[in-house]
Image (cartoon, rainbow, N blue to C red):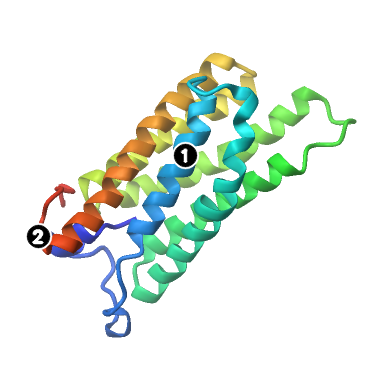
Amino acid sequence: MTTQATRHDAPPTTPAPATGAGFADPAALGLAGFATTTFVLSAANSHVMPVSVTGVVLGLAFFYGGIAQLLAGMWEFAKGNTFGALAFTSYGAFWLSLWYLETHPFPATVSAHDANMGVGTFLLVWTIFTAYMLIAALKTNGVVMAVFAVLFLTFIALTIGKYAQSTGWTKLGGWLGLVTAVLAWYGSAAIVANSTFKRVVLPTFPR
C-alpha cells in the first residue's frame, strides 16, 4: 500500500516500469475501500453500532473492500509495485472470503465452539500475513507503516476474541479497527490531495 505522496517525496518500494507510468495511483482506491469496509465492521465489533446490524457490511465487503480493492491490487501489479499489489489483492480477497463466510453459515451440526475455532484460525492466518507485511511496510512511509501496525494489533485482538470466545477482546479489536480505518482514510486522502495539488498537502512521512 504505497501512496502518491511516497512517489513524490521518496523513492518507491519497487520501481514502476515505463509502461505503467501513465496510470493513476491505485492506492487511493485500495486504501479507501479498505478503510470504509473496516470502519463499518469495526463499528459493529466495538458495539458503536448494534451487532444485530453487522450484515450492513456485506455489500461493502463484496463490492468495495473486495472487488474494488482487488482491482487496485491488479493495477499495482501493472505499475510494478510488489508491495501494493500483494497488499491490496490479498486484503481484497480477505473481504470477499469474509463475505462468503457470513453468507454461507456453518451447518447446524457444527457447534458454536468449533465454529469459533474455525473463524479464529481464519483470523490467525491473516494476523501472520499482516505481520510480515508490517515488516515490509517499514520501508514505505509513516502512514502505511502505522496502518499495518494497528491492523496487526486488530487481528491479534480479534483472533484471541474468537479463540477465547471473549466479547472484550472482540470489542478491543473493533476499536483498533476503527483506528486502522481512520489511518487508511488519511493515506487515501493524502494520495488524492497531493496528486491533485501537485505538492505535499497531507504529509505521509516518507522513510
Residues tagged 1 and 2 counted as in contact (Cβ below 8 A): no
Q: Amino acid at mark 1?
A: Thr
Tell me the element at label 1: helix
Q: Residue at x 27, y 44 (%)?
A: 186
Q: Position of residue 139 (x, y in %)?
A: 24, 53
Q: Nearer the viewer, residue 150 or 41?
A: 41
Q: Position of residue 56 (x, y in %)?
A: 59, 37
Tell me: residue 35, above or below residue 168. below
Extreme-bottom residue of the structure: 19
Q: Residue at x 21, y 45 (%)?
A: 142
Residue located beneath label 2 in the image: 199
Q: Position of residue 64 (x, y in %)?
A: 50, 53
Q: Nearer the viewer, residue 170 or 65?
A: 65
Tell me: residue 185, above or below residue 157. below
Q: In the rendering, which numbered label is found on residue 38?
A: 1
Q: For mark 2, does the 10 Å Cα neighbourhood hold few (<14), some (14 to 19), or many (20 or more) residues?
A: few
Extreme-left residue of the structure: 199
Q: In which quadrant is the N terminus drawn? A: bottom left
126 to the left or right of 178: right
Tell me: residue 117, above or below residue 136. above
Tell me the element at label 2: loop
Q: Amino acid at mark 2?
A: Arg
Q: Residue at x 11, y 55 (%)?
A: 200
Q: Nearer the viewer, residue 24 or 116?
A: 24
57 to the left or right of 193: right
